[in-house]
Amino acid sequence: MTNLSAEPKRLAIGVVGLGRIGRQHALNALHYVPRTKLVCACSPMDQDIEWADKNLIPYGVKVYRSFEEMVQQSGLEAILIASTTKVHYEQVVAGIEKGLHVLVEKPLAMNLEQSRKILALAQQPRYSHLKVMTAFSRRFDDSYQNARKAIQSGRIGTPIVVRCDNRDKYDRSEFYMRYIMANPGIFIDTSVHDIDLTLSFIGHNARPKSCHAIGTIALHKELAEIDDVDNAVGTVEWYPPSPGAPAPISYYYISRIMHHGFDNPTEIIGTEATLKVNLHPRRDLITIADKNGVGNDVPPDFYERYEKAFVTELGVFADCVLDGKDLPYELDVAVKGMEVAEALQESLRSGRKIEWDVGGRRVDAREGSKL
């Protein structure tokens, strides 16, 4: 006889890192995703532990200062990594080797080499039962999901140009400055989202042909110390998806100096129509008309804009683990995105155009050699 009162199976998950985004992930796992059970979290930072004392421990969540201690917790099934990018590689590897499912915030690692090592490890037969996914929250936003469905249905014909802008609000807070000074580069940190969206629009099998990037420092002068910029533009030429088909182009503009708030427009131009998402940033449906004109408020940051998407993302991951379903995209897609992002970062710093041959091997344009 079926026990109707039995509690449904939930995924026992631990959150690694309790900074800005880690706290939101922890609250989502604890309160808003029905099929997850937050059993533990960790952070070495005093302010994070203090926050956890008030927001997690009262609900029975075990909080650790050490990642190594946390992954030893009995009954733990999965980890959500939201720590600084510098430790993603070692924590993802440790999680896989411990037999845990892994959801890791973008980027997967600091660079392409580390990303490929993670992919090779996850593809080993002994770990094939584990779900390992890079968290690209925008894929789970209703508007972007509807955009992808429209493209897949042929509504805009063949996508030819993908234009993505990712403009963060200007922020001089200690947290934000520490964050951007520790990041692996503006394209790797930020454009991986837009490159991933591009792959979702033009196809996961898309192959890059060339890329080029330029940038400048407008306000965050400290970025010169790490050879990075606060405004950048990158373009990618992709190989035609089939013989005789047009070659897609993607364009990425990234900024860290917007004064009005977070602004993230996307435009996909097809052979039969154009599709636009987030063209005009809005915090809500309120419009104010006064002596200064007509206007509206804008989200201050990415999380407010994609709050629901983060919940959906974790819910989908939990469903895939608990029900044995395929992930919505494989780990090699994230690695391909990292390859393009790293190439854009290299182009930004070197001033050179980066090229690939049709087989996917890097070509040194100066010598014509294969890398």
Image (cartoon, grey):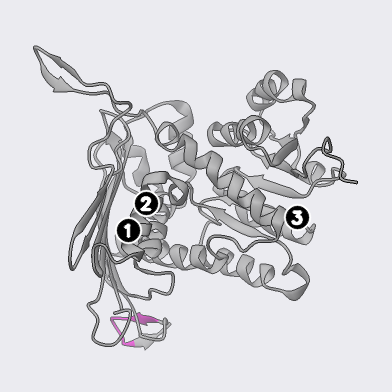
Query: Can residue 227 be seen?
Result: no
Residue 328 located left or right of residue 4 = left
Q: Residue 343 occupies which quadrant of the picture? A: bottom left
Which of the marked residues, 1 or 3, is nearer the chain's N terminus? 3
Q: Which of 253/148 is in front?
A: 148
Q: Residue 46 occupies which quadrant of the picture? A: top right
Query: Is the C-beta separation of discs 3 and 2 under 8 Å?
Result: no
Q: Nearer the viewer, mark 3 or mark 2?
A: 2
Determine if the magenta segment contains residue 107: no
Which of the marked residues, 3 or 2, is nearer the chain's N terminus? 3
Q: Which residues are magenta?
A: 362-368
Check disc 1 and give the amino acid type.
Ala
Check disc 3 and give the amino acid type.
Leu
Q: Which residue is mark 2?
A: 146
Q: Which of 207/283 is in front?
A: 283
The answer for how far apart the CA atoms under marks 1 and 3 are is 36 Å
> Residue 161 location in percent, x, y?
23, 64
Q: What is the total number of numbered labels drawn onto the structure image?
A: 3
User: Circle 1: is it few (<14), some (14-19), or many (20+) Cα within 10 Å?
Assistant: some
User: Circle 2: is it few (<14), some (14-19), or many (20+) Cα within 10 Å?
Assistant: some
Query: Can residue 263 be seen?
Result: yes
Question: Residue placed farthest to the right in the image?
Answer: 1
Disc 2 is placed on an element classified as helix
Q: Which of 342/247 is in front?
A: 247
Q: Which residue is mark 1?
A: 150
| Residue at the (19%, 57%) spot, across then down | 274
Disc 1 is placed on an element classified as helix
> Residue 338 location in percent, x, y?
46, 63
| Residue at the (39%, 32%) spot, across then down | 301
Q: Which residue is mark 3?
A: 100
Query: Is the C-beta separation of discs 2 and 1 under 8 Å?
Result: yes
